[in-house]
Amino acid sequence: MTDVRLKSFGAYSPRLRISAEEFREAWGHFEAAGVQTKAVPEADEDALTMGVEAARRAIETADITATDIGYLVVATTTPPMAESDLTARLASLLGVPADATTRTLTGSTRAGAQALDAALDAGPWEEQSGLVVAADCPTGSPDSGIEHAAGAGGVAVVVGGDGAGTVRDRSSYVEPFPGTRFRDAGEGATAELGVTDYDRQSFETALRGAVDGLSEFEDADAAAVQSPDGKRPYRVTDALGVTADQIAAADTVSTLGDTGAASALLGAAKAFDDGAECVLLAAYGSGAGANAMIIEGPIPTTCALEGDAELTYPEYLRRRGDITADEPDGGGAYVSVPSWKQTVPQRHRLIAGECPSCDALNFPPSGACRKCHTRPDAYETVALPGTGTIEGVTTIAQGGAPPEFAEQQSKSGPFVSAVVSLDGPRGDETVSVPSQVLTPGASSVAIGDRTEAVIRRIYQQEGVIRYGFKMQPVDSD
Amino acid sequence: MRDAYIIGAGQTPFGAMPDRSYRSLFLTAFERAVESVPDGIDEEDIDEAIVGSLGVGGRQLGLSGPAATEHLGLHGIPSSRIENACAASGYAVRQAVQAVKSGMADVALAGGVEVMTDMSSDMTKYWLGVSGETEWERLTGTTFAGVYAQMASTYLDQYDASREHLSMVAVKNHGNGAKNPNAHLGFECSIDDAMEAPDVAHPLNLYHCCPTSDGAAAVLVASEDVVDEYAEEPVRVAGVGASSERVGLFQRDEYTSIASSRRAGATAYERAGVDPSDIDFAEVHDCFAIAELLAYEDLGFCDPGGAPRLLEDGVTELGGDIPVNASGGLKSKGHPIGATGAGQIAEAFKQLSGKAGARQVEDPTYGLTHNVGGSGGAAVVHVLEREVGR
């Protein structure tokens, strides 16, 4: 039913975790059944940065390069901006060509499965590949079941004319169930009326509608069913004709929480990573609609879903911005948006320049060469591999951050600021940059440590999020 | 070119003076400079003025030179503001020397003024941040303390040095500042105080960082053609050197030395015809403790990596071979950004005139001042000479 094949999965979750126990201590109860811990985005993470993390892993696992991608679709219920094309920055951050066909799907937790569905319809492409990215970090009001369950994660699938995976069958179903999980225009937090039986009926009806449209899938090793919490998918085993074991084989909700539009695809990635050869994908979105697919593998998969830092409940509230201040009134150092735009190749993809006179690497490649001090007509641009060594390092103590970083520090605490000598594309030549260094799990950073670049939010000013690279210790994965 | 002389110099106390305007501070510094001229000066002799300031908190970003000098009653003379971050008024003095040496002025006023303490801490951070490399360094979250801390981390990694050496700078400079009535933080501190203070940007703690201050300083520079009217034994500007460097640390070849300081020092020594060993005392730019260690090396008081030994041996203490920051330095005397360089000259003038009181260096002939902008994007060094029996 489609000639498009699946080449790879990549999956990513933030490293921060909070346990159900922390919620119980804070609130006296915990409303997200079946969730033991959940992933929490760091202050500088959002759906876009998580999507980049997942996509990079999928692209590398597929053994293609970003320049091979001709079709890009991204799905999330939590785009960092309600309006402003997400795919433009995603393509730039990944190095996907500017003339790729791009799509954004949002407004439903089944958007991730819809994105894969759309890619299956769009391809195959002659020379190129397609990239499906789903990433989400939902939020609810503090003492709601939605918030207790709300997790974070991203998943990406590379598709194309060849690949190890096939979609044997797929199906879609909609039926109006107004008043199940929803978010009003302009709202940040997702809500639900909490009409429990009605919500369950909506979930079951839509998913059964979609799954009933499929051929047999008795050979499925796992059932990647939408998981708004850790119990809901197990309530529909009979309706879908799956077993609890099949659902458990694609479980991510118990450790990552509700990953919204990424939920079902993340489950599939987890199952394929564990060696599954056939997975039922069953994604649900309130309102209501569902997509179901039978995906045959095995499919090469790279997952980075481990947590390594436990948050207390107050630390969690700080990360969420519930008890922190916004940008201070004093104003910040100012780089206009148009001048920031001029440095996007450097900030997104580490594009440096070689001096035509002395070959020295310059970053950013503009003005006189830092080595020979001549002014070249043009630098020879080169992409740096993104690895580098710490040359000088400090920790900006709490309260000491510049105004533009006060909000980040308020949420995440002291941060490491370093000068890093980035490796050149060949040989010994390096070029130095200032960068924050992520310290997952309270690891420390010392001169000589090896690091690699990741994409994060750098700061936000005038309402515009500035994305760019930060470094993290290389052995931290 | 004819010689230039410092005929008078003065400063306000440095500190927190929220009841003073930048104009009134500058007026006080000017009056003290005028009073310090040994044989007196008619203010109408002043031909030109150059005022250093980072921007006095934005309250008079444009035309702060004329705004200050017209307030003094120096009516109608050419007046301008020079900005080179923390080196603003070191450069103002250099520019006054140029004006005098060139013949365009016989007497020039150089000074600096800053008001830092009457702003919210957010606003202060904003003004402190605008002189770093903005686009990359600042906007990855790096502060000034952060940049100097990065230098310190590299220095401690590369040489036989520890945080204790950084703290020794604080102890020494506070000890000197306690003898200076103009000091912002004129109290002594123990090595324990200076080791145990909370971190600002590791390895730098609070005692490894200077305060931001309010204050003003003024310097009167005269040509050799007219100097006899004002002083019998004036202080000669024996040599001036200045140099620039990449503003961002990451753009430089080395993090354990400030190349602009090295070049400015070498030029000043050459023009003065002296060696580092001829220097009897120095006022160096110790905005952070590591900066004083780097200054010892960049100015040739010791070899690279040798600064900790100078501290251990007390060479730079008052009474040592080369007392450094007898005034208390930026650390204790204070750091009203735009006034700091001229304030160093005022201290050197006082020392060379034998009027430094309890912190007087014994019978000096050559004094050196070293003023750095930002993390080394600009540096200016003056070598001053007490000219006996002119």
Image: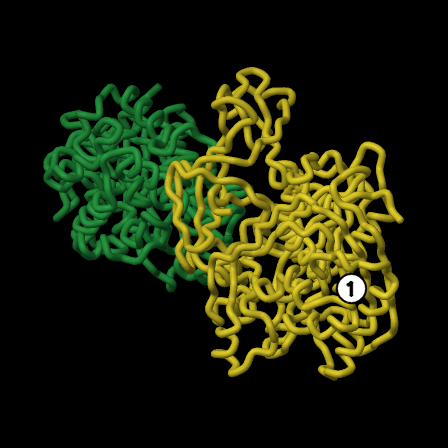
The quarter holding residue A237 reads bottom right
The quarter holding residue A386 reads top right
Q: Is residue A250 left or right of residue A407?
A: right
Q: Is residue A145 left or right of residue B231?
A: right
Chain A display color: yellow
Position above or below: B311 against A15: above
Tell me the residue that label 1 is attached to. A107
Position above or below: A412 against B222: below
Q: Which chain: green?
A: B
Q: Position of residue A153 (x, y in %)?
A: 63, 57
Q: Position of residue B43 (x, y in %)?
A: 35, 42
The quarter holding residue A143 reads bottom right
Q: Residue at x 78, y 68 (%)?
A: A240
Instruction: Classify 10 Å Cα crowding around label 1: few (below 14), some (14-19), many (20 and above).
Output: some
Question: Is B62 or B192 nearer to us in this picture?
Answer: B192
Q: Is residue A95 left or right of residue B79?
A: right
| Element assignment for label 1 | loop
Position above or below: A145 against B69: below
Question: Is B153 or A99 nearer to us in this picture?
Answer: A99
Q: Is residue A476 visible?
A: yes
Q: Position of residue B41 (x, y in %)?
A: 29, 40
Question: Is B20 or A267 nearer to us in this picture?
Answer: A267
Which residue type does callout 1 highlight?
Gly
Q: Residue at x 75, y 56 (%)?
A: A219
Chain bearing mark 1: A
Q: Residue furthest front?
A: A218
| Number of numbered discs on residues | 1
Q: Residue furthest top?
A: A357
Question: Is B262 or A200 nearer to us in this picture?
Answer: A200
Q: Position of residue B3 (x, y in %)?
A: 30, 24
Q: Colour scheme in the image?
A: by chain
Q: Is residue B86 visible?
A: no
